[in-house]
C-alpha cells in the first residue's frame, strides 16, 4: 500500500516532521480524553500559590523588601516547570512498559519522532500550564514590571528549563521503565524545590544549604525570572545570584548536552 | 509480492544477555504463505527470535531476511512489510480503538483520510465497530487482542509475527483469534507464531519448530511431530479399584500397547494412533468386559511430555513444579 524505503533526504525529513506531529497530536488527544486529569494538573500549582501566598506568606520576608506574592510567583512558575518532569516520565515509562514503544519501533516510521513528538507535546503542556499560572499570578496581584520583551524572555527561560527536564525525564523513564516509579519523582521534586530560592531566600538558610540553594539550576531560572519580570528579591551576594540570567541559560543547556545524548543512546539501546 | 524465496529466513542467530544465551544459533526457514509455529516453554528464546526478526533487537551474530529484506541492513524495509503482535497488547489505553488505529495508520504514512478509512475497515472486520469510540482501557482481553491484531494489519503486511497471541485469553477469545489468523493465511499472509501450547500450534501451523535453549531442536508438520513424539494418549479413569488389573489387560489388548498405570488414582494411560478409532476401541472393550469407567479421554501429549521426549529433561518452565511423566 505504501513504500517507505530508500527515500531521498527531503522526503525523510518531511516524514520525520509528520511523525513527530502525529505523536504530538496523540498527546493532545490524551488531554481531550482525560480533561479532569488535565485540569487538575494545571490547577495544582495554583493551589500551591494560594497556600504559600496566603497561608505562609504572612510569615515570609522578602530580601530587600517587597510583596511576598510578587516574590513567590516566579518561584511557582519554575515549580510548575519542574512538576512537568513527572508527566514526561510517566508517559515514556508507560509506553515502554506496555510495549507501545516497541510497536512504534516496529513501524516504518521515523524512529526519532517518538522522542521529538514527546518533547513537543510536553513543551505545549508546559506552555498551557504557564498560561494558567500567569493568569493566576495576575489574579493575586503579581505583575511583570520590566516590559513585555523582558517578560517574554523570562517565559523563554522557563520553557528552556522544561526542555532540559524533558530529556532528563525521558532518560530516567528509559532506564527505570517502571511507570509506578513516578512516585519517586513526585517526592524528589520537593527537596529540589525547597533547596532553591523558589519559596524563600537562601540568605535565611544555614551556610552549606544556602550554597546548594544558590547553585541549584532551579534558582538560576527563578532568579532570572524575578529580574526579567521586575519582581522583588533577585540578586544577592553570591556569584550565582548575580549571574542568574546567564546561569538560567547555561544550566538547561548543560542538562540538555548531557541528557539528550543519554536519552537517545538509551532509546537506541532498546534494540540491544 | 516477494515470491522469490522464503518469507522468513534466519541463519545462526545468536544473542547473549550476560551469562544467558537467549539464542544459540537459531536457524529458521518459513515458506511464503504458510504458518510456522515456534513451540517452546518460557525462556526458550521464542520472543528473542521474534524481536530479532522484527528488527527490534540486534543479534550478536547471524543473518536474517524477512519478506525479501535484510533485517540488519535494511530494517526500515522489513518494518514496511511486517506486522507484529507482541505478548502484551501494545495499545494506547487512554485513546479509543479507532484513535489507536488512526494513529498507527498515520505512522504508516497513510495520511489522515486513508488512515481513518482503514481504521473503520479494520474495526468492522474485527467486530469492534460498536466499541470503536470507547477507550481501550475498557476493553476485554479478547477485544484488546483483536484490536492489537488489527493494528498489525494496517498495511496488509505479507509477513505477520504473533508472539503468544492467545496467552491469557479465555477459550472463546482464543477461538476468535485463531479464526482471524486462519482467514489471513487464506489470503496469503505468512505467519510466524510462538506458543507454549501444542494444541495452538496444531490448530494453526503448517510446520512446527520446537525451540529449547535458543535453538531449534525438532521440526516437522504437526502430524510428523506427534507421531515422532508418541502421538496421542487415551486416559481411562476407573470407578472401582477391583477393576484395575482387568482393565489394563482389556485396554492393552484393544489398542495393542502397554498401558501405564497409576494405581492410587485408578488411572491408566495408553499411547494410541488414530484418535477416534482408538477411543471407540477402548470404550467398546471396556463395555464388552462389563467394566465401568469414571472417565475416558483422548488427549494430545502435553508440552511437558514433548519436551521430556525431545530433550530428556522437563521443560524449563515445568521444572520446579512439573508433573513427572512416566513414559
Image (tube, coloured by chain):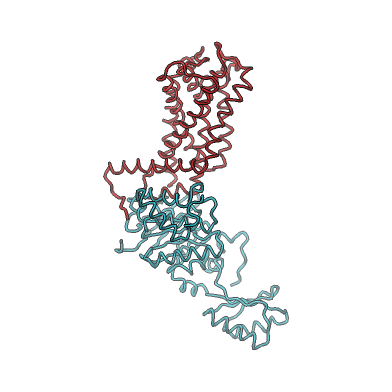
Going 49% across and 31% down the picture, which residue do you hit?
A129
Question: Can you see residue B177?
Answer: yes
Going 30% across and 52% down the picture, which residue do you hit?
A3
Q: Residue furthest front?
A: A139
Q: Residue furthest bottom?
A: B288
Q: Position of residue A164 (x, y in %)?
A: 45, 30
Q: Residue furthest left?
A: A8
**Where A104 sits versus B325, above or below?**
above
Residue nearest the viewer, comparing B246 with A182: A182
Q: Position of residue A11 (x, y in %)?
A: 29, 44
Q: Position of residue B322 (x, y in %)?
A: 61, 63
Q: Is A69 situated left or right of B97 in this image? A: right
Number of dots carrying numbers: 0
Residue nearest the viewer, comparing B97 with B90: B97
Q: Position of residue A62 (x, y in %)?
A: 57, 14
Going 60% across and 17% down the picture, which residue do you hit?
A205
In the rendered image, what is the letter of the chain coloured red? Answer: A
Residue nearest the viewer, comparing A71 with A113: A71
Q: Is B283 situated left or right of A264 in this image? A: right
**Where A236 sits versus B254, above or below?**
above
On-image quarter of the N terminus of chain A: bottom left
Question: Can you see residue A212?
Answer: no
Q: Is A43 situated left or right of B106 in this image? A: right
Quadrant for residue B191, please give it: bottom left
- Colour given to chain B in the rendered image: cyan
Amino acid at each position: 500500500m505504501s513504500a517507505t524505503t530508500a527515500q531521498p533526504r527531503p522526503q525523510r525529513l518531511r516524514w520525520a516532521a509528520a511523525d513527530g506531529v502525529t505523536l504530538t497530536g496523540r498527546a493532545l488527544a490524551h488531554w481531550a480524553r482525560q480533561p479532569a486529569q488535565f485540569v487538575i494538573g494545571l490547577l495544582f500549582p495554583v493551589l500551591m500559590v494560594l497556600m504559600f501566598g496566603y497561608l505562609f506568606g504572612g510569615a515570609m520576608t522578602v530580601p530587600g523588601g517587597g510583596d511576598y506574592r510578587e516574590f513567590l510567583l516566579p518561584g511557582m512558575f519554575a515549580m510548575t516547570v519542574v512538576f512537568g518532569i513527572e508527566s514526561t516520565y510517566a508517559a515514556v515509562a508507560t509506553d515502554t512498559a506496555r510495549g507501545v514503544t516497541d510497536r512504534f519501533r516496529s513501524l516504518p516510521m521515523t524512529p526519532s519522532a517518538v522522542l521529538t513528538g514527546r518533547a513537543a507535546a510536553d513543551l505545549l503542556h508546559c506552555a498551557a500550564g504557564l498560561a494558567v499560572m500567569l493568569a493566576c499570578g495576575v489574579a493575586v496581584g503579581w505583575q511583570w514590571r520590566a516590559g513585555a520583551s523582558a517578560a517574554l524572555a523570562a517565559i523563554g527561560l522557563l520553557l528552556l528549563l522544561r526542555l532540559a527536564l524533558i530529556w532528563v525525564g525521558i532518560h530516567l523513564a528509559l532506564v527505570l521503565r517502571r511507570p509506578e516509579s513516578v512516585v519517586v519523582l513526585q517526592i524528589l521534586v520537593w527537596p529540589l524545590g525547597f533547596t532553591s530560592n523558589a519559596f524563600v531566600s537562601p540568605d535565611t538558610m544555614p551556610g552549606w544549604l544556602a550554597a546548594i540553594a544558590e547553585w541549584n539550576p532551579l534558582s538560576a531560572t527563578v532568579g532570572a525570572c524575578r529580574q526579567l519580570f521586575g519582581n522583588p528579591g533577585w540578586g544577592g551576594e553570591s556569584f550565582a545570584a548575580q549571574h542568574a540570567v546567564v546561569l538560567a541559560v547555561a544550566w538547561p543547556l548543560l542538562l540538555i548536552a548531557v541528557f539528550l545524548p543519554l536519552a537517545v543512546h538509551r532509546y537506541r539501546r532498546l534494540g540491544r | 509480492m516477494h515470491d522469490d524465496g522464503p518469507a522468513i529466513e534466519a541463519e545462526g542467530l545468536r544473542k547473549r544477555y550476560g551469562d544467558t544465551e537467549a539464542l544459540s544459533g537459531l536457524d529458521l526457514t518459513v515458506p511464503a504463505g504458510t504458518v510456522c509455529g515456534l513451540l517452546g516453554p518460557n525462556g526458550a528464546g521464542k520472543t528473542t527470535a521474534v524481536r530479532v526478526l522484527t528488527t527490534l533487537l540486534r543479534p550478536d551474530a547471524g543473518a536474517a531476511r524477512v519478506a525479501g529484506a535484510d533485517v540488519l541492513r535494511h530494517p526500515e524495509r522489513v518494518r514496511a512489510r511486517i506486522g507484529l503482535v507482541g505478548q502484551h497488547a501494545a495499545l494506547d489505553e487512554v485513546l479509543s480503538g479507532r484513535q489507536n488505529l488512526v494513529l498507527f495508520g498515520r505512522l504508516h504514512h497513510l495520511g489522515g483520510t486513508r488512515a481513518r478509512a482503514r481504521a473503520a475497515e479494520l474495526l468492522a472486520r474485527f467486530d469492534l465497530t460498536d466499541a470503536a469510540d470507547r477507550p481501550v482501557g475498557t476493553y476485554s482481553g479478547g477485544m484488546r487482542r483483536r484490536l492489537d491484531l488489527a493494528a498489525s494489519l494496517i498495511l496488509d503486511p505479507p509477513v505477520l509475527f504473533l508472539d503468544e497471541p492467545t496467552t491469557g485469553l479465555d477459550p472463546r477469545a482464543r477461538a476468535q483469534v485463531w479464526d482471524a489468523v486462519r482467514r489471513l493465511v487464506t489470503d496469503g499472509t505468512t505467519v510466524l507464531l510462538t506458543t507454549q501450547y501444542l494444541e495452538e500450534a496444531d490448530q494453526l501451523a503448517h510446520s512446527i519448530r520446537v525451540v529449547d535453549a535458543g535453538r531449534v531442536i525438532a521440526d516437522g508438520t504437526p502430524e510428523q511431530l506427534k507421531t515422532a513424539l508418541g502421538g496421542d494418549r487415551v486416559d481411562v479413569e476407573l470407578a472401582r479399584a477391583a477393576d484395575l488389573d482387568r482393565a489394563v489387560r482389556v485396554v492393552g489388548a484393544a489398542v495393542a500397547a502397554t498401558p501405564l498405570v497409576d494405581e492410587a488414582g485408578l488411572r491408566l494411560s495408553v499411547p494410541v494412533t488414530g484418535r477416534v478409532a482408538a477411543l471407540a476401541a477402548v470404550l467398546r472393550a471396556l463395555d464388552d468386559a462389563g467394566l465401568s469407567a469414571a472417565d475416558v479421554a483422548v488427549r494430545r501429549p502435553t508440552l511437558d511430555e514433548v519436551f521430556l521426549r525431545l530433550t530428556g529433561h522437563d521443560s524449563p518452565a515445568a521444572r520446579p513444579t512439573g508433573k513427572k511423566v512416566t513414559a
